[in-house]
Amino acid sequence: MNSYLQFVTKSLSRQKMMAILAGISIILATTLLTALGLSYSLMKDAMIHQAEEVGGHHHAVIYNLDRSTAEQIRHEPLVNDAGLSLTLGAFTLPGGGINVTIEGFDSEVRSMQNVQLLEGKFPTKENEIALEQAVLKQMGITGEIGQKITLDISSINGSAGHELRQTLTFKLSGILKNSIGTNATNIGLGLASPDAAVKLLPVDYQKYSIFIRVADGHNPEQVISDIARKYEISKNQILYNDMLMAAQGYKGSSIRDSSLGWVLTGGLVLLAACLVIYNVFHISMLRRIPQFGMLRAIGAEPRQIRSLVLGEAFLLCIIAIPLGMLAGAGFAEWLSQMIAGLFNPDMLGVSSTKEAQEVIRSYHSLSYWPFVLAGCVSLAATLLSVLVPSRKASRVSPTVAITGRAAVSIPVRRKRTAHNVARIRHFVSYMARLNLKRNPGRTFTTMLSLFMGIVVFVSIHSFSMSLSGTAKADQLLEGDYDLFVNQNNKQAGFSEQNVTSIESLSGIREVRTAQYQHAEKDDVQIKGAPVLSTNEVFGYNPSMLSKLKEFMLQGSIDEAALKQGTGVIAINPMSVEGVQLPHLKVGDKITVHGKEMTVVGVAGGHAYQRTYDRLGYDVIMPSAVYQELYGRSDVQAVQLFVDPQADRHSIETALGAIKDKVPSSTLVSHEEAQAQVANTKRQMNILAWEFIGFVGLIGALNIFNTNYTNIHTRTVEFGTMQAIGMEKRQLFSMIIWEGLLYGLVAALIGVVAGSGISYFLHSINGDLASWRFPFVEIVWSFIGAIVICLVSTSLPLRKVNRMSSIDNLRAID
């Protein structure tokens, strides 16, 4: 034992198949772990950047403060950045259009809110104002800098709730870039100078808001809660930026850290690789028992035998891990392009996917920790995987090992009876089952390898779509066009003639409509509930009612009761802290516009995406009943579906003409957003298949190694079977049956575990509503498991086929 390195090198060179399989497994595991670490870091940075672009750089806003308290909070030690805003008021465009809030942002808030100028400058005097481009367009103003604009401003006293109305004239100092969602939500932004409200509003109306960014490394929710307690601030005065906090991994009120999904994925990959490495060295150890016996006979100690086996694994790691790191870095670079495609360029403040890639790359700094972590984890996992085989090798008895009997084990069998023999229906399959039972360790290892591959395929493929939130995006973007009126214009709506004109357009496949109005204080009466002015009543056409079935929580769409006007569908209000409202359930009686009705179903939400929610009870009935009850036939929301081959330009022109005739109405096309969602789905599928492919390759290597060595180490057994009369055809059939049994049993167990892990991943991602039973993945798992087992058992049979029974009996296992 003069040189461990020399012995290890020679040993590996004589076991090329073992070295190749183990080396590839280590490379693949390191590659994927490195890529996962780099990609997770890149994805997290991109999500944080997107959250800052959409929701702002602040963690929370605290409202309704006096100037002194706001300044004290600004200088709190754990507040990294803060800005003040003093709201001047709000106004609604003529006809009930966009609702515009005029804020007095200071420079810090403008930076946090990503407010950008297209032209001009930010207001510095109390008579200057800057408005968004969409606001100016709807006002019919050309937007010339210096132009005078007269506005009717409504200001609210934050504590008393009193309203102050003023007519003020401003000079346009700048044109702002539209905020994300201005057109869709009908909420716009105007900027006044920070001191405008101080000079134009009474002292009672001068209530400040502070935008807070907490120092890195501290939980924003905890820090802000401590500030609230210190300054006696109510929870109702605090609005958290949940999108940013979720991207940063803070849990907040309803936030879940998605990193657990990545950790679980990495753990599955690592476990699959460990199985391969363990299996390779375990089988190698069994085949080299005589060799270890010889070493023991010439004086090698058990410690030295262990060192030799561990040395083989360590030498493989020295070569394979750096290669895996390089491959992982290259793979992560390719993944960065895929990840950039998951984000809407508008959400990153750019106009193209190529620019989004540059933004993500520039925002993300390459970190060394994924390389260090992947290398250390791969090395530790490899050495731990080899530890058990090395200990077994060190315990080999020299005399027994040299005789070659260590691999022979004759278990005690119960006496076979005529009853046992009578149950044999298919001799070859019966022999295959006996072979699986005869060596439970080998059977367990082989099935475990296949089991891991199936679990990863079912769980990751089922979970992949929820990572991008596309299931929710599908619901938000369902339909090709939306026409709706502003909720503040109570008299606005699309007439029956408008709806008929839309339905008659060439290429229109389906039209869903909804009528709604704000209920008066006593219009909707619910036993045990306070009288609310936030309740709303809706009338759905048949197509929209049919869609509502997907959102039912209790009961069903009782068409008979709904058509008769005796039944309604209810949507309970959102939970609000400090407000206790009873929840309606099936069978409850309510009164709507003086008519008693029965709740026949409770829905979790509306059948179409609404731009606002008044936080009261929503009552849904057929449009015919709604019209009879309220005497109104106009509709407030129209959702359109068009044929793929339709002339969209002609349709948009016709819809635009209808929209122009209806005050306070908005037309939204989802074509671009749907294309972005489709691209996101495609990119997510590619990402998922990359991970599945890597893990599947690792599992396939394990199965191939197990079955390959399994057949090659059973040549004496095969020779014995041939000698007592088994034909080669029967022998081949038996081995194929073994492969089928491996695949079927592993698939049955794997799909159950994979489905459970898929459900768990959806739950930690807060997306249980989109979870479905992975039936398609299960079918493909069964097919893939059987094919892999058949291929891995069929290939080594070619060598067995070329050997005679005498050659098999002479072979040394």
Image (cartoon, rainbow, N blue to C red):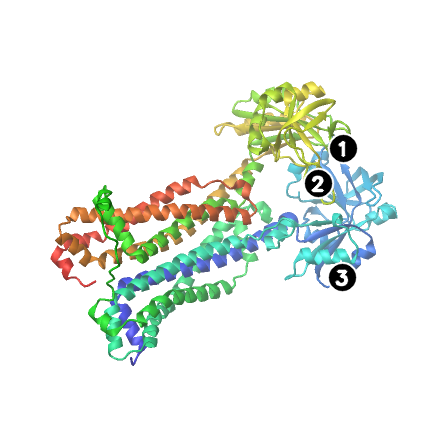
For badge 2, the amino acid type reads Gly
Residue that appears at 34% across and 43% down = 783
- Disc number placed over residue 533 in the picture, else none: 1
Q: Alpha-carbon neighbours of circle 3 within 10 Å: few (<14), some, or many (≥20)?
A: few
Whole-percent x and y of residue 226? Answer: 73, 58
Whole-percent x and y of residue 238? Answer: 73, 50
Task: Name the residue carrying label 3.
Answer: 75
**Which of the two discs, 3 and 2, labels the residue nearer the N terminus?**
3
Looking at the rendered image, the quarter that the C terminus falls into is bottom left
Is residue 652 at all visible to an observer of this figure? no
Residue that appears at 16% across and 61% down = 811
For marks 3 and 2, give the one nearer the viewer: 3
Task: Name the residue carrying label 2.
Answer: 188
For badge 1, the amino acid type reads Ser
Q: Which type of secondary structure does the marked residue at label 3 adopt?
A: loop
Is residue 110 at all visible to an observer of this figure? yes
